[in-house]
Amino acid sequence: MNTGTICPHSLPGQTPTRRRRGGTYTIRYATLATMLLAAACGSSNDDDGGDGVPSPPSVGTTTDVSEPAGSGSGGFEIELVGWSRAPYPDGADSVAIGFGGNDYVAVHIRACIDADADVMPHLLRVVTVGDYDGEPFNTGNFQTAPVVSPSGFEPPAPGDCSEGWVYPAFEPGLEPATAVWLDAAGAHGANRSWPLGDPYPIGPLPLFGDVLAAGDAWEVSDGASWTVHGVTIAGADDPLAPPQDLEPGMAWVVIDAVYCAGSSPGTIHENLGVVVDGWAGRGTPRTVESAIEPTDDDGCERRPVAVAMPEGMSVTAVTGTDHTSPWWRIDPPVEVTG
């Protein structure tokens, strides 16, 4: 039987299994029991679709593998695939997904469960970060909303594997050195940890969930759809720039999008957002009203959406509502300039 050792594993060039997950922008600061209850009740409606997903960028070696995958207890395996730091520049708090003043990182994990495993699947997502000795910074404080463009981690069903992201939050000033799986049930030989190693380089990150190319349509409610054709950067005098003033160091990212109303003319379903250097930005999407115009397709109109983002970053994807799937990959990335 496979047994539950956490295996430090650097997998450059591996194409990930795609998973799908939604979420709301909340931080869970609670006791371990409360956190586990929330995890147990989370959605497990996963989707393994999404062709054309790029392989993860190369990531530095985490550590030597001391035991082969699956050599511990419990009939499960967990692998650290990589991790990422928030790339936002200083002073860009207005566009970062918030953690109530805490710092945070994104940890990319992969997990498998044997068909006859004696672990509850939701326990596999209880991953945080800690110090060099593997002492966790907390008892599993994490954010359920995706803060990076890939979808969050959804635990696999018995006999299956899945991968995705968890988003540990911790007090400012702490420097995470290890990823830590918490033995929350106290039945699997105590916590396990492994060195984080080098983070993913700034730029595109591995994508999970429904991944679309420019020109692909996203079907929403009542037969309506959004189609993203790309992004541009609008200067101050550009007709695509909204009339609102920008903070210093910010620029308008304009999503070239077409909306088709379906059976609900006059109603706009869902919205769009942008991903910069792999992380979903919190900027408020604003329709460029002056640029709305009908297309050749009946019931469709060009409907550009502008979002303020920090200069010096690059747009790597466009997101659906609330920074969840689908993801339109922007390749090559578009630099945000003033």
Image (tube, rainbow, N blue to C red):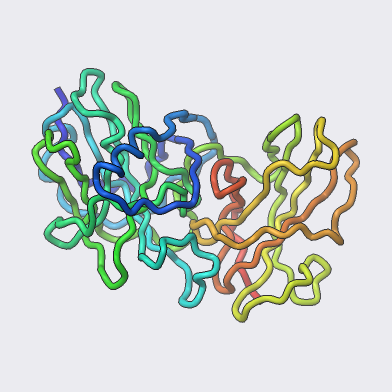
Rendered position, 257 above or below 338: above
Could you say where residue 298 lies in the image, as x and y percent from the top left?
90, 36
Could you say where residue 305 lies in the image, as x and y percent from the top left?
73, 56
Q: In the rendered image, which quarter is residue 115 located in?
A: top left
Rendered position, 4 above or below 91: above
Report the side of 30 relative to 6 (left or right). right
Report the side of 294 relative to 328 (left or right). right
Residue at the location (81% across, 37% down)?
261
Quarter of the image containing the N terminus? top left
Report the side of 184 relative to 289 (left or right). left
Residue at the location (90% across, 41% down)?
296
Q: Nearer the viewer, residue 150 or 261?
A: 261
Q: In the rendered image, which quarter is residue 295 located in?
A: top right
How many marks can you see?
0
Q: Which residue in the rendered view is the most extreme toward the bottom?
A: 248
Quarter of the image containing the C terminus? bottom right
Could you say where residue 241 lies in the image, as x and y percent from the top left?
77, 68
Residue at the location (77% across, 68% down)?
242
